[in-house]
Image: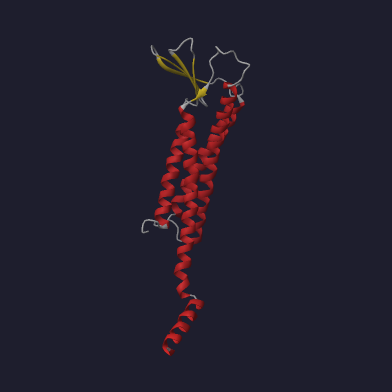
Amino acid sequence: MVFLTPKMMERTALFVTFGGFVTSLTTTFIPFWKTMNSDLNEVENWFSGLWHMCLYTEEVGIQCKAYESVLALPMDLQISRVFMMVSIGTGVMSMLAAFPGMEGVNCLQEPKLKRGLIILSGVLAWISGLTTLAPISIVAYTTVVEFWDEGFPDVMPRWEYGEAMFSGWFGGLALVLGGTLFFIAVCMGDFNQRSQSAPNSPQVKHRARMQYLKTEVL
């Protein structure tokens, strides 16, 4: 198909990677990783994120307060902060490396260098996606374990999944998909180069001449 060219695949990969990066960046800073609603006081909703704890009431609205101590945080939140920062950094580097390596961008003229930059972008996008999926999965696991812990009284409210958990999974998968599309673009470019050079190869010319001689004899 006309649209399935390396150039279009590179642009699609950059678009998907950018969408995943924005989603992961938003997930990092919104305080909706976990939510808690008490049956004894239904007008209060608690929200927990990597950086803030928030309380929502109908009278006042939402009020957030930053965590006072990093060391006092649960281990899953401390690990999640590190992973999400790595995800943001590698996501930015992936897009910065991809732009000069794309076809149609004349910042660089070396085909091998441009190909290497696209491969690097794919690797960085994969790292960014995996470092987004890892903390989301860790927090999800600890939330499930604490929710079903029989040591807590039944009347005690427990944390549940927040909206950021699902947006984080989506962003991480989008980053992994973007990295995969970068690799597909490289493979498509290599295939096109082999196809263009094949008709000029000595083997192909020899076969064409032999076929011509056979036809002439007939």
85 to the left or right of 7: right
* Quadrant that contains the C terminus: bottom left
Residue most toward the front? 218
Count of labels in the image: 0
Name the quadrant containing residue 43: top left
Colour convention of the picture: secondary structure
Residue at left 48%, top 76%? Answer: 204
Residue 106 visible in image: no
Q: Looking at the picture, does residue 211 appear above or below residue 119? A: below
Residue at left 52%, top 38%? Answer: 87
Residue most toward the right? 151
Q: Looking at the picture, does residue 201 appear above or below residue 46? A: below
- Residue 205 x/y as whole percent: 47, 79
- Residue 194 x/y as whole percent: 48, 67
Residue 101 visible in image: yes
- Residue 156 x/y as whole percent: 55, 13
59 to the left or right of 31: left
Residue most toward the left? 2
